[in-house]
Image (spheres, grey):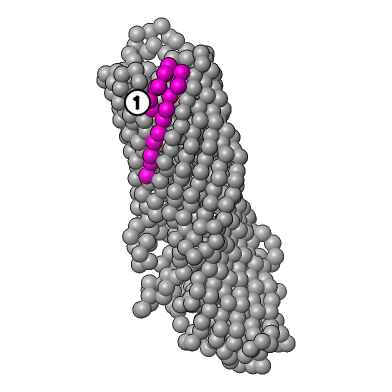
Amino acid sequence: MLVCCVAMTASAQDAFDVLHLSQTELRGTSRFMSMAGAFGALGGDISVMNQNPAGIGVYRSSDVGITFSLDLNSSKPVGGQKDSQTKFNVNNIGYVGAMKLNSEVMPNFNWGFSYNRVNSFHRHYRGGFDNIPTSLSNYIAGQLNGSGITANDLVSTTTYNPYFNSPYAPWIGIVSYDIATKTNGAADIISENNGHLQGLYGDGTTGFAEYEVDESGHTDEYSINFGGNLANVLYWGLGFGIMDLSYDSYHYYGESLDNAYIKDSDNWQKSQFMLGGADFGFVNYLNTKGTGYNFKMGVIFKPVNQLRIGLAFHTPTYYELRDSYYLVSNMAAFDGSTLLYEGEKGSNGGYYYRTDYSIKTPWRFMGSLAGVIGQKGILSLDYEYVGNETMRVGDDTRNHNEFPDVTNRVKDYFAPSHIIRVGGEFRVTPQWSLRAGYSYKTTQVKDVVDNYRTDIVTVGTDPSYQYDTNEQNITCGFGYKYKSVYLDMAYVHKMRKSVYNAFSPVTSVSPIEPNLSTDVTDNNNRISLTLGFRF
């Protein structure tokens, strides 16, 4: 029997949920994307307001632009089915105003505002596991046993509601118990057996599992920036961002087991078990909405005209969020081809549960270097450090209480991400330019997570978790300028490798109780068009 000493916390989100909501991707103007976002030392583009706000100080004239994009996304897990989506987006809208000061010390002072889609959550994939070595039901039973929760804690009475009265709020355990009824007893994914809770998987049990993940939503940023230049040598900028986040997910996980340990339908109150067939599934629905704010600051140093050095710092984004979530579980048990019992149960008495909380995303540091080659070319290199281990979760702003247990797990699970971006531009004629770029982002988790050497705690009703192992962008594009009007196009091919885990391994027992996981590959293609006017 699986034993897990993981406490069930009452917070709405845990470490991997915050990681997921904190993600950003390569988006902005077409010029910015076609050079893989390697603009930290260059400036002179509307997208720099979301990267290095010092880039706004480079402007000598006003600028207004809008960017459209067509995204063709596909995801495929190992051994699973490939699913594709096509989305049309407005990636970026921005304005920069330039004011000349007629001063040698500060020749100009600029301001600007922009809308930018920072991240799209759209993703859909599905697959299965053959010959599973354990069951989600055993994992749930182990969590509850390790927390000292008994069957009586999971059953509603006229005076007791386990969704709110339980000290641990083990909702996934509550909806796994007392699902289907027959005569004077109940059939469950987890059952009581001599004082402890038991899952369906035991000696001789075999079966397979299937899963589906369907996500949608976005993170948008509205930025206000100010900047200028000092003696045409040092450019500076400050930015304030307002974030709008909306995320929806549908997660399904189900198992079909043979020789499962199911309740004996003729001996309910004797806690006797028999071997039979069992099919069960969980469907999790989640909607997350909220707003946040952040600050950015940066400088660009130009010691000579051919060399630019950029530095930028992004504070965390401080979000206030609300979750609405709901779980439906179902189970059917068989003796051969005979249906013994079946049933369905929803969390929170059939209603969505809502909770408010706050999160703090990672802080970011960027260092950039760019070279200008005559009047024809530009080469640029960016490095970005993302402090994933600095993320935090707390209750709503009325109390400002951080959850220390989640903070400790963030430190235990996550490692900093490192992003390298390289981009170049070549001016073929005064009107036409060609561009290309490449970026690479490293993993977000420590080796103990990636090698399944630690237990992963999740909260709410969904035991699954995901993380990226690496992300690459290969980009190219061109630009055309006629007098004050410009047109830019970009193509971005994004390759992302990530890991889907149906539930956590259990490392507190020997031998280690395995989890179910698979690699997922995204191949996303984006074509974008920017129309702009400088005056």
Where residue 206 sits: x, y (%)?
A: 51, 82
Which is more toward the observer, 135 or 78? 78
Looking at the picture, does residue 323 appear above or below residue 181? above
**Residue shown at 53%/18% (left/top)?**
485
Which is more toward the observer, 69 or 361? 69
- The total of numbered circles placed on residues is 1
Looking at the picture, does residue 471 appear above or below residue 36? below
**Residue shown at 34%/11% (left/top)?**
105
Q: Which secondary structure type mostly characterizes the magenta part of the structure?
A: strand
User: Which secondary structure, mark 1?
Assistant: strand
Where residue 68 sits: x, y (%)?
A: 57, 33
Classify residue 512 as left or right of residue 122: left
Classify residue 378 as left or right of residue 94: left
Q: Residue furthest front?
A: 428
**Residue shown at 64%/85% (left/top)?**
334
Q: Residue furthest right?
A: 183
Instruction: For residue 290, say whether it is visible.
Output: no
- In the rendered image, residue 30 lying in the magenta stretch gets the answer no
Quarter of the rendering containing residue 172: bottom right
Residue pointed to by mark 1:
378
Where residue 251 sits: x, y (%)?
A: 58, 61
Which is more toward the observer, 11 or 317? 317
Looking at the picture, does residue 458 appear above or below residue 414? below
Instruction: For residue 294, say whether it is visible.
Output: yes
**Residue shown at 47%/63% (left/top)?**
78
Identify residue type, mark 1.
Ile
Q: Residue furthest left?
A: 303
First to last magenta residue range: 425-440
- In the rendered image, residue 438 lying in the magenta stretch gets the answer yes
Where residue 65 sits: x, y (%)?
A: 55, 24
Q: Residue furthest top?
A: 102
